[in-house]
Image (cartoon, grey):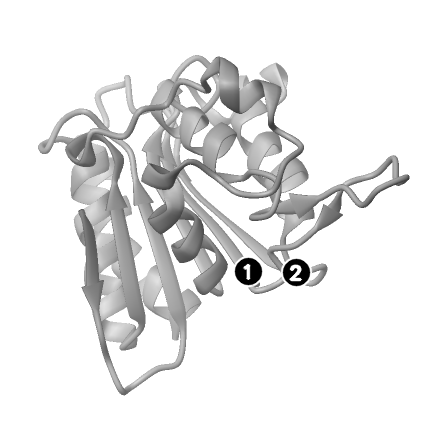
Amino acid sequence: MTLRRRSEQSSRRVLVIFCHPCTEGFIPAAFEQVEVGLRAAGADVRVHDLYREGFVPELSADEHRTHLDAGVADELQQHADDLRWCDTLILVYPTWWSGQPAMLKGWIDRVWASGVAWELPEGANRLRPTLRNVRRLVAVTSHGSSKLMNSLQGEGGKRTLFRSLRTMCHPLARTHWLAFYGIDADAAAKRDAYLDGLAAKIERIAG
């Protein structure tokens, strides 16, 4: 189900993709703060909660065979329409094994498809980006390990978003990496401080 909220205060069009199997915990709490910030900014918001919607992340054999053909499966059309509608994309998810959860990675695999995020003109050997509407790409995520450890590991999840997905967006698209590191450590006060400040950060981005 896609939730839609309308506001006359702002022309910012924000698509939020929430990916977590649980409804309680740090990332669900971060998602709530994202919504608080967007309401304060008066943004026009659409939300997809991948787990609650029962999103199917597996790329089918038929989708793979026809991946150069423009368009997506019928059940993905709303996702594609919302992605082409937004000017700001916010992804809220936990980082697992240095990257996006399988559910979110499957959303990227299936929705960022030919005719939605890119096209390959006949005779060309490079993809042509088509999500020029997306001018802000935001990640709200958590890491079990420290920022130093993630840097040493190469920050694979961050590269996926800001070196791959961003190239399909507007050439001047801005990126915002709102990550909380070291969540596996006993840092309740730091977690609370991150959540307390998150809504204001989102409001500034979407304002």
Circle 1 packing at 10 Å, graded few (<14), some (14-19), many (20+), is many
Which residue is located at x 53 percent, y 59 percent?
A: 136
Q: Which mark is residue 195?
A: none
SS class, disc 2: loop
Foreground residue among 10 and 50: 50
Which residue is located at x 66 percent, y 60 percent?
A: 170
- Looking at the image, the residue that sits furthest to the left is 24
Q: Position of residue 201 (x, y in %)?
A: 36, 61
Q: Position of residue 204 (x, y in %)?
A: 39, 69
Which residue is located at x 29 percent, y 86 percent?
A: 9
**How far is disc 1 from disc 2 in space, using C-alphas?**
6 Å
Q: Quadrant of the C terminus?
A: bottom left
Type of amino acid under label 1: Val
Which residue is located at x 90 percent, y 39 percent?
A: 123
- Looking at the image, the residue that sits furthest to the bottom is 8
Q: Which mark is residue 134?
A: 1
Q: Is residue 197 visible?
A: no
Circle 2 packing at 10 Å, graded few (<14), some (14-19), many (20+), is some
Q: Disc 2 designates what residue? A: 170
Foreground residue among 86 and 193: 86
Q: Is residue 58 visible?
A: yes
Name above or below for residue 107 compared with residue 46. above
Marks 1 and 2 close (CB-CB < 8 Å) = yes
